[in-house]
Every structure is written in structure tokens, then in C-alpha cells.
Image (cartoon, rainbow, N blue to C red):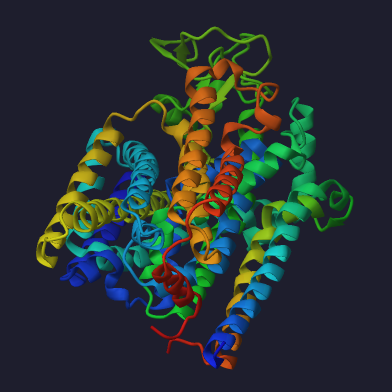
Amino acid sequence: MNKEKINKYAYWKANLRIVSVLLFIWFVCSFGAGIIFSDLLDKIKIGGFPLGFWFAQQGSIIIFVIIIVIYCFLMNKLDKNFEASDD
Amino acid sequence: MDVQILTYIIVGAAFALYIGIALWSKASSTGEFYIAGGGVHPIANGMATAADWMSAASFISMAGIISFMGRDGSVYLMGWTGGYVLLALLLAPYLRKFGKFTVPDFIGDRYYSNIARLVAVICLIFISFTYIAGQMRGVGIVFSRFLEVDINTGVIIGMAIVFIYAVLGGMKGITYTQVAQYCVLIFAYMVPAIFISILMTGNPIPQLGFGSKLVTEEIYLLDKLNLVLNDIGFNSYTDFSKSKIDIFCITAALMIGTAGLPHVIVRFFTVPRVRDARTSAGWALLFIAILYLTAPAVSSFARLNFINTIDNTSYTETPGWFKNWEDIGLISWIDKNEDGVIQYRSGNALEKTKPQFSSERGKYNQRLVLNKPTENGNEIYIDRDIMVLANPEIARLPNWVIALVAAGALAAALSTAAGLLLVISSAVSHDLMKKTLKPSITEKQELFLARLSAATAILIAGIFGIYPPAFVAQVVAFAFGLAAASIFPAIVMGIFSKRMNKYGAICGMLSGLIFTATYIIFFKFISPEYNTSEYWLFGISPEGIGVIGMIINFMIAIIISSISKPPPIEVYEIVDNIRMPGGK
């Protein structure tokens, strides 16, 4: 394998790692906190919100936005390290 | 000033703005027509995507639906936002790098097959028309209620406006009008929400007011709502009523469906760089989240307000909005115990649910219905779609707020309709004509064809608006289910698996499509009497079945491709290329 190919392979592997970690968080915060474990979380109340209900109606959405922001940040850094950006 | 004059002024000013932008941004090449020349700033693209995505359903219907579904309504909140995470992480950057015009372009090239392209075109056209019918209907409702023109005239005016900026400006015109439409719709959504939040909880931020205490009593709004609902026989607002597996599947189907909707995906072709595709997915979701975090607050305010205003009020003392919506046929009251006072309880008030009005009036001048009353104590039928539109009136907000809501609802419906029209037109002129049937046409001819098919699509959409097919509401499940079961897996496998070949992709798309379509058609159209959880597969309703369709698609595709010839070497190069942002 030449150097360019190894570089490509490493970039793709790093990319997949970022994506899978973020998708795991995505799943836990929406399906996990909002649906599967919501009964447990409902026992905790923050202000007027049962916590599971809050995750299902607002919390998950806020976390979705944060996930994409982190993704952009990490990928820009990765692009820079591998000189892979399309500027 | 009178509500109607104000509405005319505000809606008129908004329309003038849209047309002005359209004239300023006329498209002169196919590149500008399909993807706005690929030069849209990520923030502008984020706003445009948000307006494109938030349809009449998000603006008008969603808060109303959640208002009556309570916690079960969370499926829409999570489902219609979570898809953007999938879009940003799995699709947008790679499709941007691929750098063509349409979704079928990608599927056709990646799977080196015009059959694959054609299957994608068919899915796309079906999904888009389903969606557009709903938008035109929304335009009609707003016009008839607030401008007091006939629904049909309303639809025609809406068509004319969209015609001007979609046919002239293409994606370029649409993108910049959508930026303006986003501003109009978000302002129109927030103003009444803020007013109502202050009135009810004293908190000027509705997203927080939702979890605050009431002004009138020392009790949290949600606790009060649960108490009031339990009192009159409903489940608690903050509890699930559907089974968890169904909630899970519907949420997943909506998320994956969102990521597979062609008019959303195509937006990420319009930005200059791969990096901008990622960023603009973030901006889009942020702009969407502003409305989606407010919607559940509006829902709870509206439900509590509605009960307080209507339950135990005598019909003759009901406010004007009640009778206005009754006149349009979206509210009905049947005086079961003949006391002249409205009782709002759990259950359907009428047999067959929807009221069929007779021409006569009752002794309090209420509209009489032909339906038989049901056994329960509920006397009110209310169409859930009116909650957002009626909300400012229910809370007695000033007239200009009511006018603003009308303009916002129109912006939401028109922006989505325009985005969909563009997808349909490019599927016809680019994928069907240029790439499949008649590759010899020049760019000028292709541009003309694109305009012609946009115009035709508007006409068909208008006809759907004027003669709405009775099944519009039912087919929304279709659009998401099909996108989840067909387009999404095909694109994801095209990017993340090099080995996936055309046989696998085509068989996968077709089996996902056929399975999902059959399931929905069976329960929604052929045997609706069996549409209950005991007959569903694993207890999954037709709304959520797209997830199973997607799993079938993935499985069939992987099995078939592993036993058939691997794709040619050029395809490996395409995949290698889209995985790296830089390089050609």
C-alpha cells in the first residue's frame, strides 16, 4: 500500500469512530432516556418536568443540536490533521 | 383595526417580499435551477432547509396533535428532529462531495444502473406528491378562515405565488424566499407563544414556561393539566398511552424517513464545500429546534386554556372563535344532556367521529349534526388542526397577532410546497429525460423542461388542494415509511459499503418498498377494521412499520450482493472519492 492509501484508510477509520460514538449518544438520549428508561427517569422531577417526559419532548432535541455541533468540530479537526479539507 | 384588514396587510406584504426576492434571484443555468449554483452560505442554507422542512404539518397541526396526544406526541418531536443527526453524520457530507444534482443521480451512478435510478425516481415522486397535497390543503384552510375567500380561490392564489418564484428562480429563487419565509414563520410562531406563556405562567420564555408554575395558583402547569384531565376522565398528559414498542418504532420511522426525504437531502447539494454541508445541517436543526422546543409548550398551554374556556360554559356564552370554527365545521357541540352547557370529556362525542352537519340550527343556534351521539358524556368534537390557529384567539391576544399567525402558516406551507416542486421537476427533467430517455438534449432545453415540469407539478398539486383525496392524512405515514424503507438504506449502503452492488440495492429497495406499502395499504385502506394492536406485526402500527421495511431492505441487499458479482472498479473509486472531503 502506498502512503496515500494508508492515509485514506486511517482517515476513514477515525471518521467511523466519531460517527459511531455520536450515534450511540444519539440513541441513548432519544430512544433510551425518552422511551425505554422514561418510567425510571419520571420519578425525578426538575421544576415542573418529570425527567423522562422532558427528555422525550425537549431534552433529546437539545442534545441532537449539540451532537451535530460536536460532529462538525471533530470532523474539521480531523480534516485538518489529514489535510483532507476541500478548501 | 379589524382582524381581516390586518391579515390582508400582513399576508400581502409577505407575498410582495417573496415575489421581490424571486425576481432578484432568477436562475439562468441548470446548475442554478437545481442546486442554486452550489454557492449558498451555510447559515442561509440552514434557514432555507428549516423552512423547507417545517411544513403546514409542523406549523399548524403538530402542536394541536401533541395537545391531544400528550406524551405520545413526543414521537413527532423526537422523530422530526432526530433525523437531522442521521442526515449530518451519515448522508449530507458524502452526498455533497459526490457533487451532482439529485438523489436519483447518486443512486443511479453508485449502482451503475438506470433501473436503480428509476426505482429511486418513482419513490421520490410518490413521496413528494403525498407531501405536497397536504401543503396545498393547509394553504386552503388558512385562506378560508382568515381571509374569508373560498378554499379553492385560496389554493389558486397560493399556486400562483409558488409558480412565480419556483418556475422563474428554481432552487436559487426558492432558497432565498425560504430564508425570508423562515423568518416570517418563526416570528409568527414565537409571538403568540410568548404572550400566552406570560399570561399563564409569567415566564416570557415559552420553552421554560412549560415547566413553570401557574400565575393563578401555586402549582406547576403540567401538574395542573394532569389534575384537570384526570378530573374529566382523560389519562395524565405526561403518561404514555401507546405501547412502548410502537412509540419506539414510530419515532424511528419518522427519524429515518426524515433523513431519506429527497427534498431535504437535496438541500445539502447547494453549499460550496463538504464542511459547509455538515455545518448547515447543524444550523438547520438549530433553526428547527427553536420551533420544536416551543411546540410542546404551546400544546400544553392550549389544552389547559381550551378546557378552562370551554368546559362547563353555556353555549350562548362561548367566545367568537368557537362559533367561527363551528361555522367552518371543525368544531361541533351536541347537547347530550340538554342543559345548554358544554361538557368536555374523554371519548368521541359522535359516532363515526367526524361531524356531518345538517342544515338546521338547534335551540341555542348551534349547528346540528346528523351523527348519532355516543354513550359517553363528551359533547365536543374538535379538529386537532385548529389548535395553533385558534390559540391566539382562545388566549384573547391582540388582532395583529392573529394576522401574523395566518402569514406564518402560509409561509410554512408555501416554502415546503416549493421545495417539493423543485425535487419533482428535477426528477423529471434531469433524471428521467437527460439521464435516461434523451441524453442528447442541450442544457437550455433541459432548463426549459425543468421549468415546464415545475409548472405541471404545481397544477397537479393545485388539483390535489382543490379536490383533496380523502386519504391525505392516511398517506403521510406512507411518505415517511417509504423513505425509510427505500431511499435511506440505499444511500447509506452506497456510502458505507464498497461491496454493495446493483443487484443487492435494487432487490433491497424493492423488497423494503413492497413490504412497507403492502402493510400500510392493508391496514389503512383494505381492512381498516383490523387496524388495532392485536392484529399488528409485533404490535407495530402502520406509522412505524417503515423501520421493519428498512431492516428487510438491509438484509435482502446484503444477502443478494454477497452472492452476486461485485461492483466494477470505477464504483470502488467513486466510493473512495466521496469518503474524502478533499481531492477530486
Up/down of B567 relative to B143, above or below: below
Residue B77: x, y in percent? 61, 51
Q: Could you tell me which quadrant the C terminus of chain B lies in? A: bottom left
Up/down of B369 relative to B303, above or below: above
Observer-nearest residue: B62 or B423?
B423
Tell me: B492 left or right of B74. Answer: left
Tell me: B279 left or right of A26. Answer: left
Which quadrant holds residue B9? bottom left
Which quadrant holds residue B154? top left
Observer-nearest residue: B96 or B491?
B491
Residue B110: x, y in percent? 41, 62
**Residue positioned 55% across, 83% down in the render:** A8
Observer-nearest residue: B387 or B126?
B126
Up/down of B247 relative to A2, above or below: above
Asked if residue B540 can be seen in this view, the reply is yes
Asked if residue B1 can be seen in this view, the reply is no
Up/down of B583 relative to B174, above or below: below
Residue B145: x, y in percent? 36, 37
Residue B370: x, y in percent? 46, 8
**Residue positioned 61% across, 8% down in the render:** B338
Observer-nearest residue: B339 or B292?
B292
Which quadrant holds residue B567? bottom left
Tell me: B541 left or right of B30. Answer: right
- Report the number of numbered marks: 0
**Residue positioned 74% across, 34% down in the render:** B243
